[in-house]
Amino acid sequence: MISVRNVQHNYRHNGVVESVLHGVNLAVAEGEFVVLMGPSGCGKTTLLNILGLMMSPTSADSVALAGTETLGLSDSARTRLRRETLGFVFQRFNLLPTMSVRSNVALPLRIRGQHADGAVDKMLDRVGLLPQAGKKPGRLSIGQQQRVALARALIGRPAVLFADEPTGNLDSASAGAVLSLLREFHRDWGQTILLITHNEHLVGAGDRVLTMRDGRLHD
Amino acid sequence: MLALAWANLTHHKLRTTLSALAVGLGLALFLVSNGLATGSIGEVADRMESVQAELLVLPAQENMVFSGGAVFTPGWTDHLASVADEQGPLATDVIPAYWSQITMGGQQQRLFGIDPEQMPLFLGDRGMVAGHAFEQATAFSQRIRELRATADGQPLDTLLDDDEWSAGLELVIDDRLRRVGQDGHPYEIGDVVRVLGREFRIVGVVESGVAGRVFAPIETLRLINDGGRQRSTMFFIKLRPGLDHLVAARLFTEQLGSTVQVQPTSDYGRRLQQELGKVFMYVNVTNTLALIVCFLFILLTMYTFVLERTREIGILKSLGVTRRGLIGLSMLEALLISSAGAVIGIALSFVAQAIIAMRLPLLTVELPPQHLATAVAIGLVGGIGSALYPGWRAARLEPAVALGYE
């Protein structure tokens, strides 16, 4: 489902080039739940952004998603692939504060031009937030906001879910609830999940654990 | 998209209100400056065109706006009355006027010297707000005519005693000038005003819209300025019913020669614009500058509005909204803000118009529908156009970069 070869990425700050990824290779099978561990600043989020087509690598031999080689794709083709195949859960939730919980969750379907009525309430019910459907995200607890973000990421049944430190801002109870939901959805729908974290308690969450250190992946 | 745009705008109520207000202020600036320039000049033209006479006669070398001091010598009233076609004289009334520049209400005014008996031709269907259209001036004018016949070369003003003089020192003013008044107080009937070195008494206030803001008996002005000679600055001609005024103007010119210019009174506005061509050029430059300021105002407002939402744009990109969709969203929001701004701008302009009419009655702010439509078009085109660049710029950012924007 995910296959990358020799991904390199550099950042340039005030003329100084900083190399973040050094020839990363990765293969994740369809339906696999992979946990990518590593300390802050090791390049995890950069790799996820590249895999999620949210930025382009400085160089790579291949970045393939769901059987599509993404290197060289136009912006609109990358956007379409992101819209139809990928889902994201961020550490900072990234909900739209202007819209209600229901509208936030419905957004991916609306962007695809699909009707959202029943599916959204069913999804909210599943994450335990149907009573909060009409509220704005700012009026929910942090744990609830992350559950809304999870619901929004999964409402369109993406083939691949990228979760970037999804429990990073949560207390242990909320983190446990989000993780349980992730496992539940994975069990029921079988999407490919790549979860990145620096929290060692999440080691047992997935099928496989990878470690990243200084821009390189280790099994 | 409309729901998303609307949600964004209503969520940031203060920001949206301030943005719409900024657009509205820009448009109001344009509307009021434009309306003030065209309105004040248009009001002068309307007043002149309100005279119940079809033609206006000036010495050939005289400028319609800036009097060069050329005058008609005595006898011209008879010349004009004698112009005829095969059916008889063209004029039913020859109406002389004698202008003087004075200061009243804190600014320069054109004092119209007219025959008190011809006042109805200047009033038209307008009425008196207070007092009378001259009280003793008719008798005064009659007295001057008698003296002129018997003076035998003596200066007429020396033949009048103080009581006779005071009968001629009457002023009729219009309601706008009355409201401006003097030293913060509106003029009232009976007020004495020092004009042309004499103390005139205000005897009447007429509805605004008549040719002059200040009228005095023509014989008084001739006496003060011209030793009582029967000279005139200009004439209005009331034509025989059924006469085409353009044909009549041509006949007058043909029969009187090139020493006069004869124009339809209804053409005064157009002529005024010609005479004031350079002033209008200045007005147009001012309006263009106001327009550019207004446009920059809208651009800055929209740019800030879109820039502040870069992170939200990143979220939408991560969810798969295309560049075109994001630019469309920015433009839709800009359209909504600009529409609200246009409404605010028009409302502010009407408020400014009302305040100017109340506080500065001699000024006129004209807000015709075509100006309002232009302002709305500027607001909408400016708003959408201004959102285009920041929207395009934000949409080009990589989602990861936009999401990291604080």
Image (spheres, coloured by chain):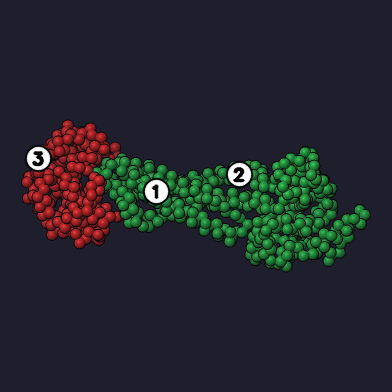
Chain colours: A red, B green
For label 3, the SS is loop
Q: Position of residue A18 (x, y in %)?
A: 23, 39
For the point 26% across and 38% down, which residue is it? A76
Residue tagged 3: A29
Amino acid at circle 1 = Leu
Q: CA distance from mark 2 to mark 1?
A: 33 Å
Q: Mark 3 is on which residue type? A: Ala
B348 sits to left or right of B37: left
Which numbered disc, 2 or 1, marks the residue that appears first in the sequence?
Answer: 2
As displayed, is residue B371 above or below residue B164?
Answer: above
Instruction: Establish whether labels 2 and 1 are both on one chain.
Output: yes
Q: Which residue is mark 2?
A: B280
Residue at the image position 23 percent from the left and 55 percent from the top: A102
Q: Residue at 9% across / 40% down in the picture? A: A29
All told, the count of numbered labels is: 3
Q: Is residue A79 left or right of residue B253?
A: left
* Residue named by callout 1: B335
